[in-house]
Image (cartoon, rainbow, N blue to C red):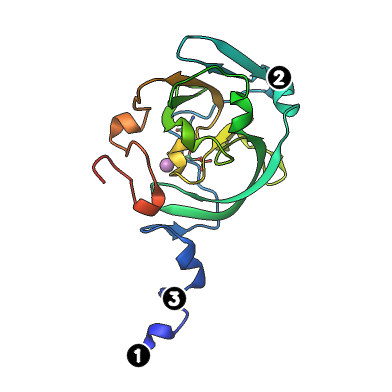
Amino acid sequence: MAIFTRGFGGRRDPDAVALPPGQHLTEGFPVLSAGPTQYVEPEDWSFTLTTETDEKQTWSWDDLMNLPSEDVEVDIHCVTRWSKLKSRWRGVPVDAFFEDSESEADYVMAHSYGGYTTNLPLEDLLDGKAWVVHEYDDGPIPAEHGGPVRLLVPHLYFWKSAKWLSGFTMMTGDEPGFWEGFGYHNYGDPWREERYAGD
Ligand SMILES: Nc1nc2c(c(=O)[nH]1)N[C@H]1C(S)=C(S)[C@@H](COP(=O)(O)O)O[C@H]1N2
Ligand SMILES: [Mo]
């Protein structure tokens, strides 16, 4: 029978094995925003880490540029079922922002210019698993994709990668962010297909 035939249907496409369940490949880069694109100039951008005791630390664009950045090439997976392989970013591992933090909280709310939020366990942001990125494909991140600075958490569905990142707030207890409050899964592991609450 035809099960080993490559071609129409693509079921034996070697790329398919790299995709989480229920995802298909896109060559483009769809834009998904719950509200209007935010236009923030690098000189107006800042990032504030607020601890559970309301201590604040703020980084300007220049501060961000002075932290060690690295190049990352990662696959990204949107809950609306597109995946993009080998997307190329440059940014600072999230670990750098916690070096001088006295926080003992286990959960983080990421905040964006424009009001978007998304919640993550702190451990999913540390140990080189997530980045505060400021370049896409060797250039500035286009505003519609979250520039000048977005969060990149490639091991979770892409709604966790907050565009126009403005800060983290530490939380001793977990709380839903924007989409999590509208029924998206609290954690969002694409490999376990955690799309919606109850998955
Ligand atoms: N601030 C902000 N960040 C956001 C969103 C948003 O609406 N606002 N949408 C999320 C969703 S659902 C997805 S799939 C990705 C889309 O990123 P892209 O537009 O660069 O593809 O951004 C995530 N980050
Ligand atoms: Mo999404």
Residue 76 at x, y = what percent?
51, 49
Residues 133 and 38: in front is: 133
Q: Residue at x 23, y 42 (%)?
A: 198
Distance from the alpha carbon under mark 3 to that under mark 1:
13 Å
Residue 1 has which mark?
A: 1
Q: Residue at x 37, y 28 (%)?
A: 178
What's under tag 2, amino acid-wise? Answer: Glu
What's under tag 1, amino acid-wise? Answer: Met
What's under tag 3, amino acid-wise? Answer: Arg
| Vertical position of residue 130 compared to residue 63: above or below | below
Distance from the alpha carbon under mark 2 to that under mark 3:
49 Å
Mark 1 is surrounded, within 10 Å at the Cα level, by few (under 14), some (14 to 19) or many (20 or more) other residues, namely: few
Q: Earlier in the sequence, mark 2 or mark 3?
A: 3
Point out the quarter of the image occupied by ligand 2: top left
Q: Residue at x 50, y 18 (%)?
A: 103
Q: Residue at x 74, y 22 (%)?
A: 62
Q: Earlier in the sequence, mark 2 or mark 1?
A: 1
Residue 54 at x, y = what percent?
49, 9
Residue 43 has which mark?
A: 2
Q: Secondary structure at mark 1?
A: loop
Q: Which residue has dot 3 on it?
A: 12
| Vertical position of residue 106 compared to residue 186: above or below | above
